[in-house]
Image (cartoon, grey):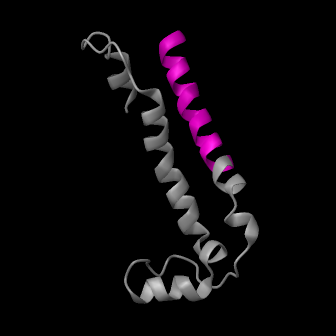
């Protein structure tokens, strides 16, 4: 959601915004991209190569890394989401309160 859309919500007659939906939607793409960058660390190089052969992953996705538990635990995903959500909330606060 762009800044201009947010600032005009009240003028457009919107009285309720589902912030959690916005946070989930806008942070999901960042998590997805980060997981692609670390695909072989999450699913292993063999699986990445298999997905590349099937045309589901491009050659830009690194396929030479070994699996690492730190990349497929919940904490890994939570840290990425937390940082992105923090950016989104900071933007909202700056629009609404400053």
Residue shown at 50% from the left, 58% from the top: 32
83 magenta-colored: yes
Q: Locate residue 86 relative to residue 19 in the image: left or right.
A: right
21 magenta-colored: no
Q: Which residues are magenta?
A: 79-98
Residue shown at 59% from the left, 83% from the top: 63
Q: Position of residue 41 (x, y in %)?
A: 66, 74
Classify residue 1 by image quadrant: top left
* Viewer can see residue 98: no
Q: Locate residue 96 relative to residue 45 in the image: left or right.
A: left
Work out whether residue 15 or residue 86 is closer to the camera in this orientation and state it.
15
The relative height of residue 29 versus residue 97 in the rendered view (above or below) is below
The relative height of residue 42 versus residue 47 in the rendered view (above or below) is above
Q: Locate residue 54 relative to residue 90 in the image: left or right.
A: left
Work out whether residue 98 or residue 48 is closer to the camera in this orientation and state it.
48
The relative height of residue 79 versus residue 94 in the rendered view (above or below) is below
Residue shown at 64% from the left, 85% from the top: 64
Q: Position of residue 38 (x, y in %)?
A: 62, 69
* Direction front: furthest residue: 74
The main secondary structure of the magenta stretch is: helix
Q: Position of residue 75 (x, y in %)?
A: 71, 53
Work out whether residue 18 or residue 55 is closer to the camera in this orientation and state it.
18
Q: Position of residue 19 (x, y in %)?
A: 46, 27
């Amino acid at each position: 959601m762009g800044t201009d859309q947010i600032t005009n919500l009240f003028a457009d007659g919107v009285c309720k915004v589902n912030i959690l939906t916005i946070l989930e939607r806008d942070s999901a793409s960042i998590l997805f991209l980060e997981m692609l960058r670390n695909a072989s660390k999450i699913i292993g190089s063999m699986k990445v190569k298999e997905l590349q052969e099937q045309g589901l992953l491009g050659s830009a996705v690194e396929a030479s890394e070994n699996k690492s538990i730190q990349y497929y635990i919940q904490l890994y995903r939570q840290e990425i989401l937390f940082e992105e959500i923090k950016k989104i909330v900071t933007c909202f606060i700056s629009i609404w309160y400053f």
